[in-house]
Amino acid sequence: MALITYEHKVRVAYKDTDQMGIMHHSNYIVLYEKARTEWLRDMGLTYAEIERRGIMSPIIEVHSKYMWPALYDEVLTVRVSLDEMPSARLVIRSEVYNEAGRLINEGSVTLGFMHADSRRPCRAPEWFVATLEEYIAKCNE
């Protein structure tokens, strides 16, 4: 069961489709990032703020499973979920639904944490975990 879920809507742009009007498979990873970025913003954080605090979060792993095509001009709902609190890694699941509510793609992104100055891995900063815990509590009120 997810600790927290966040949804972001996005329209499939013409530039993101192939000649058949189907969204190119590489764009799902971009959708994951857009939803993840907006989720962080809703939490009160941005990647810029995280980096100003001396932490970078490189992507370590990405998985994506394609079940049904996304079509040009369709409004998609990207749902990102967090199943467990981060330690040295942050794993965010993503589900993409079409306008009919059909699950068309699912995946996950694993991010690490590292000190910006040394580029050495580290655990999730206490302030990041605290912000996440506050956000989860607020959303579950």
Image: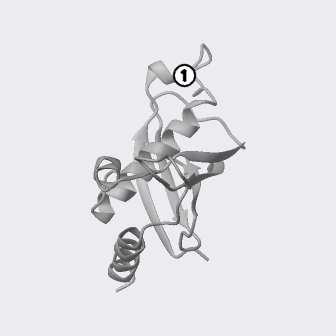
- Write the residue at 50% across / 37% down: 30
User: What colouring method underlies this structural image?
Assistant: one colour
Extreme residue in the front direction: 118
* Residue found at x 40% / y 72%: 132
Residue closest to the eye, 14 or 113: 113
* Residue 23 against residue 123 in the figure, above or below: above
Q: Nearer the viewer, residue 67 or 47?
A: 47
Q: Residues within 10 Å of mark 1 (few under 14, many from 20)?
A: some
- Asked if residue 98 can be seen in this view, the reply is no
**Can you identify the residue that label 1 sits on?**
17
Viewer-nearest residue: 12 or 91: 91
**Up-down: is 113 above or below 98?**
below
What secondary structure is found at the residue carrying circle 1?
loop
| Picture coordinates of residue 108, whole percent (x, y) | 63, 53
Of residue 16 and residue 60, the one placed in the foreground of this image is: 60
Location of the C terminus by quadrant is bottom left
Please determine whether, in this image, residue 133 is positioned above or below residue 112.
below
Q: Amino acid at mark 1?
A: Thr
Q: Is residue 18 visible in the rendered structure shown here?
A: yes
Farthest residue to the bottom: give it: 141
